Image (spheres, coloured by chain):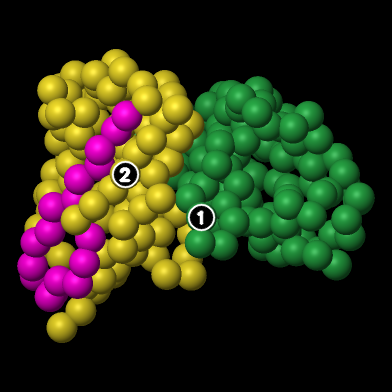
Chain colours: A yellow, B green
Amino acid sequence: QVQLVESGGGVVQPGGSLRLSCAASGFTFSSYGMHWVRQAPGKGLEWVAFIRYDGYNKFYADSVKGRFTISRDNSKNTLYLQMNSLRAEDTAVYYCAKGFGEAIDYWGQGTLVTVSS
Amino acid sequence: EIVMTQSPATLSVSPGERATLSCRASQSISSNLAWYQQKPGRAPRLLIYGASTRATGIPARFSGSGSGTEFTLTISSLQSEDFAVYYCQQYNDWPLTFGGGTKVEIK
């Protein structure tokens, strides 16, 4: 069965950096686009970024463009999100999610990122 | 960006009753719409894609309809496990966008 396990969350100061990872299993990782979606405490879902199956096309939400970078290593079945210049409003649970076309069919359990001094 | 608007924000329904949730797109998205269910402390789960196709393992009491800018998720007879927050999402254009959610609560 599809499993997506995020890691790398934690507490970071404003202006700091963090890299999230997502270990994928149960499907052919190199054949699917992947997403990051976040959810601030008590709020709704916000799509963050997408990377095509081969890593060549990437898309970002305006709120993170220029600060976050999505990448993948198909040899390790792992998705990444490099987050720089973090702000308080980036505080959220970050979900790794498997693409289904451009939709999303499976989600990880999420990792919490807290940006606070 | 395409703005997705869900209504109502909260829907109070008795078990066994029908629930109708609405989602509107700020411009046409054809049938490129998905619905997700989220329970407290859990990840979202895909219910419907292509506006009307149920995802694998989703009970037949869940149905989706609509195209263009107006969409509906119907739960024909609410079960206790259906009380949750429901989100619509468009995947017609980048950036992908979600609606603000509808909370279905017990009346």
Compared across the picture, whether A114 is left or right of B75 comes to left
The chain that hosts pointer 1 is: B
Q: Gap in Å between the C-alphas at discs 1 and 2?
A: 14 Å
Q: Residue at x 87, y 44 (%)?
A: B77
Compared across the picture, whether A49 is left or right of A117 comes to right
Which labelled disc corresponds to residue B82? none
**Percent of width and height locating residue A62:** 26, 50
Residue behind mark 1: B42
Residue B97 sits in quarter:
top left
Q: Quadrant of the N terminus of chain B?
A: top left
Farthest-out residue, bottom: A117
The magenta segment:
A9-25
Q: Do callouts 1 and 2 point to residues on the same chain? A: no
Depth check, front residue: B12 or A112: A112
In the rendered image, residue A17 lying in the magenta stretch gets the answer: yes
Residue behind mark 2: A5
Q: Secondary structure at mark 1?
A: loop
Compared across the picture, whether B87 is left or right of A62 comes to right
